[in-house]
Amino acid sequence: MKSDVNKTTRGIQSRNREEVTTRILVAAEKVFAEFGYAGASISRIAASAGIPKSNVVYYFETKEALYRRVVGEIFDIWRAAADSISVDNDPIRALGEYIDTKLDLARTRPYGSKVWANEIIQRAPIVQDYLEDELRSWTENRITVIEAWVQNGQIRPISARHLLYAIWATTQHYADFTHQITTLNDGVELSDAQWEDTKTAVKDLLLSGVALPGQDGVVTDG
């Protein structure tokens, strides 16, 4: 009986830790995006999360540790978005799914993209090691897949590296320049229908340059 009570208590404590950690990370992502690393503070993040500063410090001893966790989670989400880029998958469909997911993330996680952009613009003072290790390795792996598609005659002989750069630049534009897009959309955020139109337009522009003659460069749901 006592064992069951202990298990229940540990389960509740674990859920509480997860909930608090999630609140901290969500708040930190927003604060780092709005104020940058230098302008952000543990106190500001705690206030945004609605918890005491001591709680933030308990889970993340330093601002840098919290920042690196935020950046790491952003990259992990983007990396998972590219799971479809595999040699065994149809290249146009795989790249289309990647673009769709990146645009979904631009809509639902814009602060994460802004944190990343701010860091890179500043020449990655905090996570340069992450770029040289994790990002370089991931990018080279994706390039290998795309080059295999080229060698197999499944897509045009394009630069795999620059294709990735173009996808990143285009999809992340919709997160990093949200205010500009909203302003040019008569001051209102893009609607669900406009986001679907955006996906179709971006895939048409990017994949038409990849598809072979007669190959459909746009993949729609279903």
Image (tube, grey):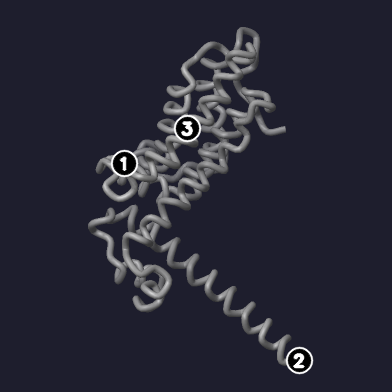
The amino acid at mark 3 is Thr
In this orientation, which residue lies closer to the viewer: 70 or 35?
A: 70
Pick whichever, 50 or 2, lies toward us.
Answer: 2
Dot 2, crowdedness within 10 Å: few (<14), some or many (≥20)? few
Q: Amino acid at mark 2?
A: Met
Give the spatial CA distance, label 2 vs label 3. Answer: 52 Å
* Within-10-Å neighbours for mark 1: few <14, some 14–19, many 20+: some
Looking at the image, which residue sits at the far top?
Answer: 213
Query: According to the image, label 3 marks what residue?
Result: 139
Q: Amino acid at mark 1?
A: Ile
Nearest-to-viewer mark from 1 and 3: 3
Residue 80 in the image, given as x and y percentages of width and height: 57, 43
Q: Residue most toward the right?
A: 1
Q: Earlier in the sequence, mark 2 or mark 1?
A: 2
Query: Which residue does the image show at 59% across and 15% down from the upper left?
Result: 155
The tag earlier along the polypeptide, 1 or 3, is 1
**Residue at image point 41% right, 45% down:** 113
Q: What residue is at 35 percent from the left and 67 percent from the top? A: 45
Task: State the separation of the CA atoms marked 1 and 3.
Answer: 16 Å
Determine whether the residue tagged by mark 1 lies in a helix, strand or loop: helix
The image quarter containing residue 50 is: bottom left
Place residue 151 in its image quadrant. Answer: top right
- Depth check, front residue: 175 or 197: 175
Q: Percent position (x, y) of residue 204? A: 54, 22
* Number of residues whose C-alpha sits closer than 10 Å to that of mark 3, classed few (under 14), some (14–19) or many (20 or more): some
Q: Which residue is mark 1?
A: 120
Q: Image check: 157 left or right of 52? A: right
Dot 3: element:
helix
In the picture, the disc for residue 1 is: 2
Q: Are marks 2 and 3 in contact (CB under 8 Å)?
A: no
Spatial CA distance of label 2 from label 1 is 54 Å
Identified at 50% across, 65% down, the residue is: 22
